[in-house]
Image (spheres, rainbow, N blue to C red):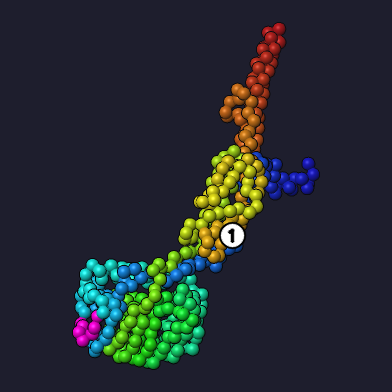
């Protein structure tokens, strides 16, 4: 033994052993360790919720004023439609206020109107804004769309330019304040039926303002002396206060409200690795309203197919390999969402070869041969030990014979 080899043996007394990390794995297992990936290319911006007509007010559409806690009026206000309160009980100031419809103080009609107004409030809030970050609307001329901002206000003129079918939804993050003398002007045939103001706090319409649209407020609504409203004042959880106001009902409103749709959206996930001959299933599904349908571009692993109605990829794989393809989910609401997936299919794991009749203890483990070699060496030592005993016995007998001679 050379000095070099001796030093290596001393430095690593186990260098003759196979490291555990070098144990051979069946080919199928090695392929199965490949990393799969998913890339959502169409849903990263999130789903878009839209409406193709006016927000549905339900039975609340017949109310000029609907309060949650109370309705209080001062002076000869004129209401074209119904007046109600729920779950509160107080309605005061009628007369001198005049009601063109029916008064509903804490009855079943008012309760249902409040339930419908809450649905409308949530619907208006769910729509995806076409323009965000607004504050003072003065001087703007806005085409149909969904507009959002913080505390929305108007101190001069706001023009809404569209047709009788055009819809505007304004989403305030807090309050709505319409200043004294402010005006909302409709042009091109635009209708007050289709203008909605969603206010999670309180709304105030100052004196002399000419306001258009339906206010869906979570808290209070106050109309100051001389303000006119073409639309509805609907407060879910607080009071409505009036003072010598005229509230007219919009005319020519559509008989059928709009339908809300949400474009598809995918929560990205990683498909599991499959194995040839073993049933496989992976849901490449998306959310959306209405429910989306699914198409594949590219090649799925052999034996797998996608359910066009559910987006589930399933079947029994027949081909080893890595397959990249895209799934497009669409439901008629833009945008469609296209997601790229990669699925790896592994071979069936190889089994160790064992001779018939071999005891279990003598079989080679799948991860190496050390156990079997040890058993073999033990058997050899036993045989050598037995031979030594026989040899020693024979030697003693021969020696004893020589002594007697």
- Closest to the observer, 404 or 197: 197
> Could one spot residue 198 in this view of the protein?
no
Residue at the extreme top: 405
Overall secondary structure of the magenta section = loop
Q: Is residue 371 magenta?
A: no
Which residue carries the number 1 mark? 338
**Which of the 4 image quadrants contains residue 157?**
bottom left
Q: Which quarter of the rendered picture does the N terminus lie within?
A: top right
> Is 170 above or below relative to 155?
above
Which residue does the image show at 55% across and 67% down from the upper left? 45
Which residue does the image show at 33% across and 88% down from the upper left? 227
Horizontal and vertical percent position of residue 312: 53, 49
| Numbered range of the magenta stretch | 92-99
Which residue does the image show at 51% across and 57% down from the upper left? 292
- Closest to the observer, 138 or 254: 254
Tag 1 secondary structure: strand
**336 left or right, relative to 184:** right
Horizontal and vertical percent position of residue 90: 20, 78
> Is 47 above or below relative to 166?
above
Which residue does the image show at 67% across and 21% down from the upper left? 388
Q: Is residue 98 magenta?
A: yes
**Which of the 4 image quadrants contains residue 297?**
bottom right
- Closest to the observer, 228 or 253: 253
Horizontal and vertical percent position of residue 6: 75, 45
**39 left or right, relative to 116:** right
Horizontal and vertical percent position of residue 37: 61, 55
């Amino acid at each position: 033994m050379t000095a070099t080899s001796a030093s290596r043996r001393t430095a690593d007394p186990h260098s003759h052993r196979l490291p555990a990390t070098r144990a051979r794995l069946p080919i199928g297992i090695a392929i199965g360790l490949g990393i799969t990936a998913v890339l959502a290319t169409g849903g990263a911006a999130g789903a878009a919720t839209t409406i193709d007509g006016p927000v549905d007010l339900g039975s609340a559409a017949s109310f000029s004023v609907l309060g949650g806690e109370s309705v209080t009026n001062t002076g000869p206000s004129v209401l074209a439609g119904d007046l109600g309160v729920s779950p509160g009980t107080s309605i005061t100031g009628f007369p001198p206020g005049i009601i063109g419809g029916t008064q509903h103080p804490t009855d079943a009609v008012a309760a249902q109107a409040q339930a419908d107004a809450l649905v409308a409030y949530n619907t208006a809030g769910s729509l995806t804004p076409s323009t965000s970050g607004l504050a003072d609307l003065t001087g703007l001329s806005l085409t149909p769309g969904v507009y959002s901002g913080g505390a929305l206000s108007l101190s001069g003129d706001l023009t809404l330019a569209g047709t009788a079918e055009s819809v505007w939804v304004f989403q305030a993050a807090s309050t709505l304040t319409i200043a004294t003398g402010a005006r909302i002007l409709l042009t091109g045939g635009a209708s007050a039926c289709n203008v909605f103001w969603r206010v999670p706090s309180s709304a105030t319409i100052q004196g002399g303002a000419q306001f258009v649209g339906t206010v869906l407020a979570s808290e209070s609504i106050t109309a100051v002396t001389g303000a006119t409203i073409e639309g509805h004042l609907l407060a879910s959880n607080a009071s409505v206060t009036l003072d010598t106001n005229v509230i007219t009902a919009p005319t020519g409103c559509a008989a059928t409200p709009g339908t809300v749709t949400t474009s598809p959206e995918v929560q990205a996930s990683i498909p599991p690795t499959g194995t040839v001959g073993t049933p496989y299933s992976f849901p490449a599904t998306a959310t959306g309203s209405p429910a989306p349908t699914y198409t594949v571009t590219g090649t799925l692993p052999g034996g797998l197919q996608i359910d066009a109605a559910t987006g589930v990829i399933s079947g029994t794989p027949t081909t080893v390999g890595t397959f990249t393809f895209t799934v497009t989910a669409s439901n008629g609401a833009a945008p469609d969402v296209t997601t790229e997936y990669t699925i790896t299919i592994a071979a069936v794991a190889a089994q160790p070869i064992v001779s018939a009749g071999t005891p279990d203890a003598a079989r080679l483990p799948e991860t190496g041969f050390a156990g079997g070699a040890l058993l073999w060496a033990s058997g050899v030592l036993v045989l050598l030990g037995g031979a030594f005993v026989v040899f020693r016995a024979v030697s003693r007998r021969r020696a004893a014979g020589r002594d007697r001679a």
